[in-house]
Amino acid sequence: NGKKAALVINYDDAIDEHLDNAAPVLDSLGLKATFYVTAFSQSVQKRLNEWKKLPLKGHELGNHTLFHPCVGKMPGREWVSNENDLGNYTVQRIENEIRMTNLFLQSLDGKTKRTFAFTCGDMKVADSVFMNGMKKDVVAARAVRHEMHQLSEVDLYNIDCYAVNNESFEEMKQWVDQAIETNSLLVILFHGVGGGNPANVSIHNHRKILTYIKQKQNEIWIAPMITVAEYIRNEQK
């Protein structure tokens, strides 16, 4: 779109801090983000009307599954319950739950085109890559590897991102500068914003990096994932 780089801002898991600490800053700066919603999260259950308002302000509601299943039998995954262990799923079950979440999100924003984010970056049920059967249901899917690529090299069903885990403003700024220098797509993923998740960013650094991104908008195309993914799909034809 005539810019040096593209940048997508993501928030995963649908937690209260996204409504309280992230959305107001985005709106004050005029930035549009993608919120990957786990449909049965506590925040969605308690504050549904507030989640419905996000798309009215230009933000995307993305699919982050119904129950946030992850592969449990891995180091550091003790928090994964048996019922939400992707290792206990069938491919049909995860497909059904993703499609159900699409339908739920459509009831919130009226939209039928949706992007998806892999929970914990897990892409397989047993040995099956479940996204292979979902490409008619989602426009693109985001993973969690810390990489950035030029648009011609982006795999729309395995989009990389830089997940924030208590980085400083200077560290996040380097990602933005690198994207500009290499003419790449940068996806920045936030979980906790001033709390809510161990993978956190302070409220101060969150505001500071978003302000820096806003200042660079003459060089960076900033848009929700669905907008960027559809652009890339047309460019790659």
Image (cartoon, rainbow, N blue to C red):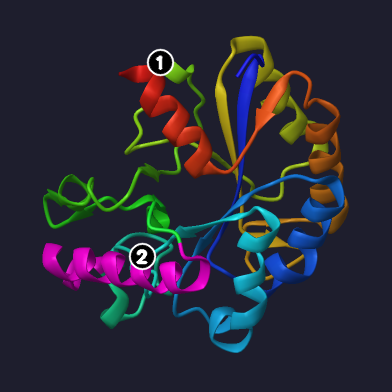
Specify whether 169 is left or right of 103. right
For disc 2, the marked residue is 102
Location of the N terminus (image quadrant): top right
- Using a 10 Å C-alpha cutoff, classify the residue at mark 2 as few (fewer than 14 neighbours), some (14 to 19) or many (20 or more): many
Q: As rendered, which of 150 and 177 lies closer to the eye?
A: 150
Quadrant of the rendered image containing residue 35: bottom right
The answer to whether residue 205 is visible is: yes
For disc 1, the marked residue is 152
The answer to whether mark 1 and mark 2 are in CB contact below 8 A is: no
What is the x, y in percent for residue 109? 52, 66
- Region rendered in magenta: 86-110
Answer whether residue 109 is magenta in the image. yes
Q: Residue furthest front?
A: 110
- Using a 10 Å C-alpha cutoff, classify the residue at mark 1 as few (fewer than 14 neighbours), some (14 to 19) or many (20 or more): few
- Marks counted in the figure total 2
Quadrant of the rendered image containing residue 230: top left
Q: As rendered, which of 46 and 182 lies closer to the eye?
A: 46
